[in-house]
Amino acid sequence: MLVVILRYVLVSYLFLFQCVMAEEPLPAAIKAFEKQGMRIVGRFDAPNGMQGYAAEYQKQGITLYASRDGKFVISGYLYDAKGNNLSLKPLNELVYAPMAKQVWSKLQKSTWIADGQANAPKIIYMFSDPNCPYCNRFWQQARPWVDSGKVQIRHILVGILSHDSPTKAAALLTMKDPAKGLLEYEKSQGKNGLKPLDPIPAAIQKKLDDNQLLMDELGSVATPTLLYFDDNGHLQQQQGMPEQNELSKVLGQLN
């Protein structure tokens, strides 16, 4: 499965960059990009007297390089003589890192059930449907990491696969001990006789709806969808169950 860097629209700019932009007017050529719907989120120094700008457009980070007089702009990656991409660092710092921070905050505030120790060094958020067999397979594959205390998986429950998916999710969320209930449910591979909660209380339905909206906002179309930080500190999104040889990439090194 392909693991891709999560790239989603940044709702608010960092205060520092807002101040810089307010103090130094944008060149006319850069303003022209703003008129096309591009969002300028930061400024950085570029080689040969050029001024670099980090921008976001349609969920993608873009670098713009203005000429010294500000009359001309080059859009795209900038490379040096050794083939090093000089655009990646400003894009990560000015666009993707703030995006990742905001997305992670939304995940933290969503309704989830924890699987694993609260002090685990690695956290993985997982959009999960109670009727998803691949969610259960990943749950089983992750046992060595979870049981060793290295990983905590936070199940963000949604109900999208079957007619009783929402009522099963609601039943898990309303249990006296949701973590224990989820553990028993997954251990039985969904065969422990979980009684769907029907009708779903309005407050629980709201939580399920919010989870679904967040899933849609992040562009996820499958369960399981996993979100986590990799070894380089980049937020990653994995849609679908990882292959066996990709588990250490998602869950980290076991030993």
Image (cartoon, rainbow, N blue to C red):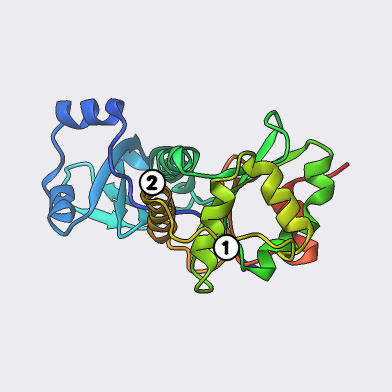
Q: Which corner quadrant of the image does residue 136 belong to?
A: bottom right
Name the residue type under label 2. Answer: Ala
Name the residue carrying label 2.
203
Please identify the quadrant where the N terminus is shown: bottom right
Residue 129, disc: 1
* Residue at the spot 47% in from the left edge and 63% down from the top edge: 220
Depth check, mark 2 against mark 1: the one in front is: 2
Q: Which corner quadrant of the image does residue 109 belong to?
A: top left
| Residue 14 image offset from top left, x and y in percent | 31, 31
- For this rendering, which residue is in front, 37 or 90? 37
In the picture, measured across the screen, residue 243 lies left or right of residue 169, that is: right
* Residue at the spot 54% in from the left edge and 57% down from the top edge: 169
Q: Is residue 83 in view from this perspective?
A: no
* Residue at the spot 17% in from the left edge and 43% down from the top edge: 69
Dot 2: element: helix
Dot 1: element: loop
- For this rendering, which residue is in front, 165 or 6? 165
Q: Is residue 233 above or below residue 128?
A: above
Q: Is residue 108 in view from this perspective?
A: yes
